Every structure is written in structure tokens, then in C-alpha cells.
């Protein structure tokens, strides 16, 4: 048996890992889009470390684009098998992949229009851009999704079974356990996917996996600990009051459409119910987030007890009078003309695409405004650069001074920190090897030392494309 690390190796996005059995049967774990500007990764999304037509089955841990975003290209390039996932992941992936296809098409169209203008002016011979995939490719990919329940063993073939267990990261997220029988011997192989955090709102806590022989483990926050939860709500409310009441400005919150947006809305809903939220308009400006919130409402089996109990007094935890969901582009543009205090929650979370870049461009130079970053951002994205404290940023071809206040709340993160990851895997007593993926090399190196100090002695940090014999 071999495992090849085909994405998210010493990187945080582009999750993709290939298991090849002795008989040649190939299992692909995730097929994510790389999201970032690392020059060494510029061709990653277009190329494969394997032939898609040779893959027998794919297993998807959850719907986030950095784990699912290349599935339509995988199908376009020859994959014809089933894609196993949880039922909620199937629901979310349907809207995520269609949205991603539209982005691919729109970005190619925008690039080619600009290229045509440049050619007329400078006679340059650059090639037009072809979308990574189109809507038709996404529709075909969606037809291959097979929704499965948590905690049930499903036979992939006569020798391989898969079990999904709630990972508590986003709706439908799961760790993956494979039971593989070869030559009369059974091997347990595990993939954490993205590990959520205990005691977070909306979702159930991550549930530890079965004991496995080999484990691929995420390490996004392997090098640090998150802010303690008790101060979270108070800090968030203070930022709202400081920006919208004292400075009379806009609070811009870049947030991923899936998970982070719903968690923020739920927290605001609780503040409103308790009479703590200032009387200001709040806008969720993301069609994808609007659709995702509707899907959240249709999967109560994923809710934790706190949310289930809260819904007894508030049947709609994702809506209140001052909250407005924005779909139309024209209404989104109108928000840039708003001068009154307000909160705008918009995608994408890393600010590398989406409507939030327009809100950023229109608000970043005004010191009355605040930009609240609520999760991980790759260092080479706009979000990562703003986290690092840059003084100016280029948006839509123009340099903008960063005069707005920058606030960071990593406690909103849906990723476990180093202590929470260790708690999640501490039951793994028979590991032969533990592979760290989905993390920057500096944090992975730090986390490897932390794991060693906590009793995990056989830890490896694979490089991109590396193949390991098991």
C-alpha cells in the first residue's frame, strides 16, 4: 500500500491525498482547490500527480472549496467513479461547486477582456484564459456525489469499507476511517479532514476517530493556541460598539460563506435576543452564504444541544429584524454608498475574491471603519497581508492606504488549535505513522515538536508529491 500527498502538503489549501492498494485500487481523499498566490503553486490547480481516469473512488471529508474545489476538473479529466461523503456535505457541495464554476467562468471572462484591451494597446501575445471548469462540469460532478450517514460502515468494494464520523468543523464535515483488507491482513487508515473545535456554537463537538494504523492529520493551527472562549462574545460586542456607535463607521467582516458566516449570524442573533445588540443594520452580502444558511436550516441532525434548546425560544437562529441577506449585485453595490453605521459580512474569508474585496476597497482608507478578520488567511492573500500589518494594499489596480482599524479574532476559527488536535487524536495508541498536512511548514515543524512532547514519536511532514510505502 502507498500514500501520495498530492495537495496541502506544507500548504494550507488544496487538500488531496492518493492511496494505492497492492492490487492497484486507487482511493482519492479530497480534491481541493489551491487558494493563494505562492509562485511555486501557480500551476497546481491545472495539473495532477496522477491520472484522474485511474481513480476508482473518491472520498470527500467536507464541502469547503480547498477540499472539494477541483472535483469538477477531476471529472472533466476522466474520473468516473462515485464520490462518497456525508449527506450534509452533498447538500453543501452542490451549491459550492456550482458557485465555484461560475467564479471560474467569470474570472476567465474578466481576464480575457483585459487581455484584449492590452493587446490592442501593446500588441502583446499572451494566451486567453480557459476556465478550470465550467457549470456543466460541476453539474456532472455533483451527480457523482453519494450521501452517507455518520457512524455507518459502507462497503467501497469487497476489500475496503469507509466510515464517516462527525468532525465538528462545518456542517457535514467528517473524519474518514478506512478498513482495508489486503493479503489476509486488515489495515486501518485514518484521515482527520479538518478538525473542528469543542464547545463551538451550532455544531456538535468533534468525535474522536477509531484507532488506526496510519493517520493523515491536519495542522492548520498546529503551532498556536486560540483565544479563550469566555471573552469572545464580549470582545465582539465591544468591537461593534467601538466601530458603529463611537466612531459611527462600518464594520466589515470577511467570512467564509460556509460555517463562519452562520456562526457570526447566530452570535449576533443571541445578542439581539438578549437586548445587547445596537440598533444598526446588518448585511450578509453573499449569495452563496444565503443559500448555505438555508441548507443549515435543513440539517438539524448536525446541531448541538445548545442550538436545539435555543431554537425552542427562537425558531430562526439565523434571522432577526435588523439582519438583511443580499443576493442581487445592484444591492451589494448600494452598500458601498451607505454612510450610516452598519455591519457587512461578506465572502471570501481570505479576501482573495468575492464581494468583500469591493467593500474593502471602499472602506479601507477611512479611519472610522474597522476590518474584523475572523480566521486563518494564507500569507500571500489580501487577508494574510492585512493580518501582517501592511500599510497599503493594491485592490482592483489601485493602491489604498490602510487607515481603517484592523481587528483579529482567531477564536472564531473552525479549526482546532494544537491542544485541541492532540485531544482529538490522543486515543490513537497503535499508530505506526502520523502524517501532518494542511499547514504551513513553520507551524508543522513546531507542532511536530509539540506532538513529540505529548507522546507521538512517529510523525512525518511530507512534501508535495511525495509517495510513502506503508
Image (cartoon, rainbow, N blue to C red):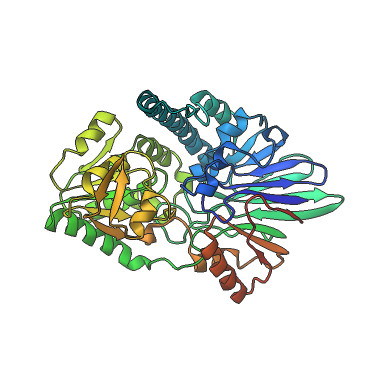
Residue at image position (49%, 42%) is 65
**Image quadrant where residue 142 sits:** top right
Residue closest to the far bottom? 453
Residue closest to the far right? 183
Depicted 232 relative to depicted 120: above or below: below
Q: Position of residue 130 (x, y in %)?
A: 50, 27
- 145, 443: nearer the viewer: 443
Q: Position of residue 78 (x, y in %)?
A: 66, 29
| Residue 200 can be seen in this image | yes
250 sits to left or right of 222:
left
96 sits to left or right of 166:
left
444 sits to left or right of 120:
right
Residue at image position (64%, 58%) is 462
The total of numbered circles placed on residues is 0
Q: Position of residue 335 (x, y in %)?
A: 21, 38
332 sits to left or right of 111:
left
Residue at image position (55%, 37%) is 70
| Residue 309 can be seen in this image | no
Residue at image position (52%, 59%) is 440
Q: Position of residue 18 (x, y in %)?
A: 68, 46
The quadrant the C terminus occupies is bottom right
- 454, 362: nearer the viewer: 362
- 394, 53: nearer the viewer: 394
Amino acid at each position: 500500500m502507498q500514500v501520495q500527498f498530492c495537495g496541502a502538503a506544507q500548504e494550507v489549501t488544496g487538500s488531496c491525498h492518493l492511496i494505492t492498494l497492492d492490487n492497484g485500487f486507487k482511493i482519492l481523499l479530497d480534491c481541493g482547490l489551491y487558494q493563494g498566490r505562492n509562485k511555486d503553486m501557480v500551476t497546481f490547480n491545472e495539473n495532477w500527480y496522477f491520472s484522474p481516469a485511474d481513480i476508482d473512488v473518491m472520498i470527500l471529508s467536507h464541502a469547503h472549496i480547498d477540499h472539494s474545489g477541483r472535483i469538477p476538473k477531476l471529472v472533466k479529466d476522466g474520473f468516473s467513479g462515485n464520490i462518497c461523503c456525508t449527506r450534509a456535505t452533498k447538500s453543501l457541495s452542490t451549491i459550492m461547486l456550482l458557485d465555484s464554476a461560475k467564479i471560474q467562468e467569470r474570472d476567465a471572462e474578466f481576464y480575457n477582456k483585459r487581455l484584449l484591451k492590452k493587446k490592442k494597446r501593446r500588441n502583446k501575445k499572451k494566451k486567453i484564459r480557459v476556465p478550470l471548469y465550467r457549470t456543466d462540469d460541476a453539474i456532472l460532478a455533483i451527480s457523482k456525489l453519494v450521501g452517507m450517514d455518520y457512524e455507518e460502515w459502507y462497503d467501497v468494494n469487497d476489500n475496503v469499507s469507509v466510515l464517516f464520523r462527525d468532525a465538528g468543523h462545518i456542517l457535514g464535515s467528517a473524519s474518514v476511517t478506512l478498513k482495508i483488507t489486503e493479503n489476509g491482513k486488515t489495515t486501518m487508515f485514518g484521515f482527520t479532514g479538518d478538525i473542528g473545535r469543542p464547545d463551538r456554537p451550532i455544531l456538535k463537538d468533534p468525535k474522536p476517530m477509531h484507532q488506526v494504523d496510519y493517520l493523515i492529520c491536519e495542522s492548520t493551527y498546529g503551532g498556536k493556541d486560540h483565544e479563550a472562549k469566555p471573552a469572545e462574545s464580549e470582545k465582539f460586542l465591544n468591537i461593534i460598539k467601538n466601530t458603529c456607535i463611537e466612531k459611527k463607521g462600518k464594520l466589515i467582516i470577511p467570512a467564509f460563506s460556509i460555517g463562519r458566516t452562520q456562526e457570526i449570524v447566530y452570535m449576533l442573533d443571541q445578542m439581539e435576543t438578549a437586548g445587547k445588540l445596537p440598533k444598526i443594520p446588518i448585511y450578509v452580502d453573499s449569495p452563496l452564504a444565503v443559500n448555505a444558511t438555508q441548507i443549515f436550516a435543513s440539517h438539524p441532525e448536525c446541531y448541538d444541544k445548545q442550538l436545539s434548546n435555543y431554537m425552542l425560544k427562537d425558531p430562526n437562529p439565523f434571522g432577526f429584524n435588523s439582519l438583511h441577506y443580499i443576493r442581487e449585485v445592484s444591492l451589494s453595490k448600494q452598500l458601498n454608498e451607505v454612510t450610516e453605521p452598519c455591519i457587512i459580512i461578506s465572502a471570501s474569508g481570505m479576501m482573495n475574491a468575492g464581494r468583500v474585496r469591493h467593500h474593502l476597497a471602499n472602506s479601507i482608507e477611512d479611519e472610522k471603519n474597522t476590518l474584523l478578520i475572523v480566521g486563518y488567511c494564507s500569507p500571500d492573500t489580501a487577508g494574510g497581508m492585512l493580518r501582517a500589518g501592511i500599510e497599503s494594499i493594491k485592490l482592483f489596480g489601485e493602491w489604498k492606504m490602510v487607515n481603517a482599524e484592523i481587528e483579529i479574532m482567531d477564536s472564531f476559527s473552525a479549526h482546532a488549535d494544537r491542544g485541541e488536535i492532540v485531544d482529538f487524536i490522543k486515543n490513537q495508541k497503535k499508530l505506526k505513522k502520523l502524517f501532518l498536512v494542511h499547514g504551513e511548514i513553520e507551524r508543522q515543524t513546531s507542532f511536530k515538536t509539540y506532538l513529540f512532547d505529548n507522546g507521538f514519536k512517529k510523525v512525518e511532514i511530507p512534501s508535495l508529491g511525495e509517495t510513502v510505502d506503508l
